[in-house]
Amino acid sequence: MASMVLFNEVEESYIMIKPDGVGEIISRFENNGFKLKGLKLFHCPKQLAEEHYKDLSSKPFFPKLITYITLGPVVCMAWEGVGVVASAHKLIGATNPLQGEPGIIRGDLAVQTGRNAVYGSDNPENGKREIELTEWTPVQTPWLVE
Ligand code: GDP
Ligand code: MG
């Protein structure tokens, strides 16, 4: 079954620190043993934000979501590890930060659903696609290749 999630697979997740997020989000993933494969600061154009969230385009909050994501630069990251997609979901927590337990990123570092600090891929297929969509170049490439 192609869609079955295998928790012992090495996967990649696209993690995005939203415009209101903070650098501590990076340490949360690092401290959990995942590998940072790429990172860039990026001011997302409206059109790409709409493409990224196209599944939510019929929701009443969609215009507010696009305004939020394009308010300022986001930090685009590719994180690799065994079961990183499901682990990222646990680290990030519920959509509404007020439902977050202590130690969960959104619970600790955000207050409102409309300013919830971070995005994580829904499944490994989306992780791959979203990393490609942002034309990923590993951050270390210019340091390794002349
Ligand atoms: P996620 O997977 O937990 O990020 O949640 P969803 O995929 O359901 O929604 C995507 C993003 O849309 C959320 O992370 C929020 O930033 C935003 N969002 C979802 N629901 C609401 C809402 O009711 N109001 C507002 N303002 N934003 C929302
Ligand atoms: Mg979602």
Image: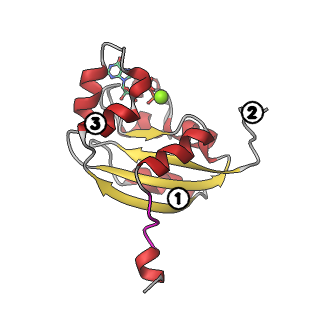
x and y percentages locating residue 88 in the rendered image = 56, 42
Closer to the camera: disc 1 or disc 3?
3
Q: Dot 3 surroundings within 10 Å: few (below 14), some, or many (20 or more)?
A: few
Q: Earlier in the sequence, mark 2 or mark 1?
A: 2
Q: Nearer the viewer, residue 114 or 121?
A: 121
Three-letter code, disc 2: Met
Three-letter code, disc 1: Glu
> Which span of residues is magenta-colored?
136-140
Q: Nearer the viewer, residue 127 or 81?
A: 127
Q: Which residue is mark 2?
A: 4
Label drawn at residue 47? 3
Closer to the camera: disc 2 or disc 1?
2
Taking the spot 56% from the left edge, 37% from the top edge, the residue there is 89
Q: Earlier in the sequence, mark 2 or mark 3?
A: 2
Looking at the rendered structure, the secondary structure element under dot 2 is loop
How many angstroms separate mark 1 from mark 3 (CA)? 31 Å
Looking at the image, is 49 positioned above or below residue 32?
above
Which quarter of the rendered picture does the C terminus lie within?
bottom left
Q: How is the image coloured?
A: secondary structure
How many angstroms separate mark 2 from mark 1 (CA)? 26 Å
Label drawn at residue 30? 1
How many angstroms separate mark 2 from mark 3 (CA)? 31 Å
Magenta stretch, main secondary structure, is loop
Q: Residue furthest right?
A: 1
Taking the spot 59% from the left edge, 56% from the top edge, the residue there is 80
Three-letter code, disc 3: Gln
Residue 35 occupies quadrant: bottom right
Residue 116 is covered by the magenta coloring: no
Q: Residue furthest bottom?
A: 146
Taking the spot 48% from the left edge, 51% from the top edge, the residue there is 132
